[in-house]
Image (cartoon, grey):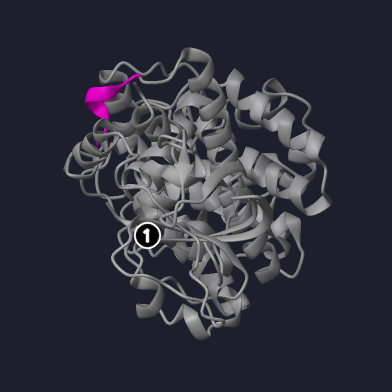
Amino acid sequence: MNERLLQFIWQFQYFNVKELFTTQGERVVIERCGMLNLHQGPDFSEAWIHIGNTTWVGAVELHLLASDWNRHRHYDDPYYQKIILHVVWEEDELLFDGYGNRIPTLELKDRIAASLLQRYRCIMDNPMPVSCASFLPALTPLAWYAWKERLAAERLEQKAMQVLETLQQCNGDWEEVCWRSIAGNFGGKVNRILFEQVATALPVRLLARHRNRRTQLEALLMGQANLLGHAGKDAYGLLLQREYAFYRNKYKLVPSALPAAFLRMRPASFPTIRLSQLAALFHRCPSFYSLFCEARSVASLSTVFADIAADDYWNTHYHFKEESKSQPKYLGRYMADNLIINTVIPLLFAHASYHNTVHQKADLLSWLLELPAEQNRITREWQAMGITIHSALDSQAMTELSNHYCAKKRCLVCAVGNKILNAG
């Protein structure tokens, strides 16, 4: 038993509530257990409880042992002067208020099912990434859908907060936020920071001067990423070097000191290919912000990324060092979907939060239902455990569940954990 579990049990009334009495023998009837308080003060506020012949409305404090009250020095803390009930696992000490009256105490150690405690220990002691795997699916399909929807919304809210932080850094310039966000996504997990540095060093107002000159765009992006050092072996590489050298001097640019990563990466995702595709996208789109805000469907967003390809030079190259078998380097459907799921929809969700348009948030969640599920380690693990993942809403939800609930053992605030602990 621990205090957080005791709070959980009290909050959901997962104990025998029949014939409740304080340790002094006064009858207890719980009308409302109160609201969990995550800040300073008693654990629950606004509880409504009958004790003896009196109805009380106020705060409830929980401890494993009654003596924790004194150990935590609640007796001289004004926040705890209006406690209506002290709920404990075990009353190991009699407590009195400032007037010498016994503090009403409810002991729960003989009222909580042993099976609940056993399941809790089983989950907490399991070292596997998903501690409750042996209990799955636990929820009904309808309950799973509701939980996934909430998880996906939580994930979007977190991403929206990051977007709004970037908006502050960009002095309220949404176009610049869109550019940095897209560039970061093109870098993937491994090169994200590098690509974000490149985008920050080359703001939209600067790159816009070169929008109609795709080669110049590519030279600026490649140069800032420090990828032109080995480019002088052919005419195209030399052209990029000359272009970047000129504009580096003109704009006083300083290339990123962060090296681009190629190791253990699919060649199609090499930073050279992605930067060339990013240049093509910037060349095509007069305004990311306008295109995204004017989109009314997933289909309209998909057209933004349709047929984006690296420069023809990259048909026979993955880097500047040597040639490869000829193959056009299109952005591809999977990458386009990834951009919509992980960049565009979070951007629009942040925009909706900024302008307080709640209905648009609901629309964006429905867009995730239209997009195919992402395929990665997390989604494969959940599918192996029998959890269905059909859409991007599912994959985003399960990513949120894995990263922010399972990995942190937050089973007590998880719908699945709640159901398992209350089973039977």
Q: Nearer the viewer, residue 272 or 386?
A: 386
Q: Position of residue 389 (x, y in %)?
A: 42, 19
Report if residue 20 is visible in the image: yes
Q: Nearer the viewer, residue 197 or 230?
A: 197
Q: Is residue 212 magenta?
A: no
**Secondary structure under the numbered disc 1 in the rendered image:** loop
Residue in view at x 56 percent, y 67 percent: 39
Q: Position of residue 240 (x, y in %)?
A: 47, 57
Disc 1 crowd, CA 10 A, few/some/many (<14, 14-19, 20+): many
Q: Is residue 392 above or below residue 64?
A: above
Q: Quadrant of the C terminus?
A: top left
Q: Would residue 144 be found to the left or right of residue 229 on screen?
A: right
Q: Position of residue 52 (x, y in %)?
A: 59, 50
Q: Is residue 69 above or below residue 5?
A: below
Q: Which residue is mark 1?
A: 227
Report if residue 215 is visible in the image: no
Q: Quadrant of residue 40?
A: bottom right
Instruction: Indicate the amino acid at tag 1.
Output: Leu
Residue in view at x 69 percent, y 68 percent: 168
Q: Which residues are magenta?
A: 131-137
Q: Quadrant of residue 301?
A: top right
